[in-house]
Amino acid sequence: MTAPILQVRGVTKRYGGLTANRDISFDVAPRENLCVIGPNGAGKSTLMNLLGGGLSVSAGEIMLGADDITRLAPARRARSGLGRSYQKTTIFPQFSAHENVRLAAQAHAASPLKMFGNVTSDADVNRRTREALEQAGLTARAQITAMHLSHGEQRQLEIAMVLATEPRIILLDEPLAGMGQSEARKMVDLIASLKK
């Protein structure tokens, strides 16, 4: 039996007298898709923010593999292998799809701020950029300015940016929001392909 990649134990978030999430526990195994569903106001985005580090837990524990990430800042969680996309698309609209993904790969590199030399010549960053664009189905659209991509392609771009960081697990907050039927089908297929 494979050990879980993510373990959530008793996670609770309180705002004074209001409890947004109470005693949430679950495991996610490698190559498993897990979906959290519920009506507006049920606490789904709060849970995503607790897992991603945007909010601190009031109680409970979050383990990524053998690492306790409960108190880590979002950037430290990302370096530990937790990838995250948000409800609202977070891309650099004036940059090409390729540049967006390269920036994500570079930010996750061992030396993200090379003081000397051309950042575009980093072979590992370039490899991760190409692979992420290919996985997200955007190779043919790599040189298009992000603001000129369709909404669905922008969501794919956001996933490519996450993939460029080589995460162990990816949290997707409402990945189909605002999509038409054909874009949604494409995104469902992309999410299913990420199991590999």
Image: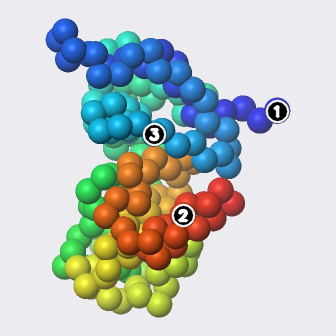
Determine the CA span between mark 2 and mark 1. 27 Å
User: Which residue was labeled with disc 1?
Assistant: 1
Report the mark closest to the observer, 1 or 3.
3
Q: Quadrant of residue 29?
A: top right
User: Which residue was labeled with disc 3?
Assistant: 37
| Number of marks present in the image shown | 3
User: Helix, strand, or loop for circle 2?
Assistant: helix
Mark 2 is surrounded, within 10 Å at the Cα level, by few (under 14), some (14 to 19) or many (20 or more) other residues, namely few
The picture places residue 179, in percent across and down from the top left corner, at 36, 68
Mark 1 is surrounded, within 10 Å at the Cα level, by few (under 14), some (14 to 19) or many (20 or more) other residues, namely few
* Residue 171 seen by the camera: yes
Please report whichever mark, 1 or 3, sits nearer to the chain's N-terminal start.
Answer: 1
Foreground residue among 60 and 186: 186
The picture places residue 137, in percent across and down from the top left corner, at 52, 78
Q: Is residue 71 left or right of residue 188?
A: left
Task: Name the amino acid, label 3.
Answer: Ile
Visual colour scheme? rainbow
Task: Name the amino acid, label 1.
Answer: Met
User: Which residue was labeled with disc 2?
Assistant: 188
Q: Residue furthest right?
A: 1
Q: Is residue 163 left or right of residue 103?
A: right
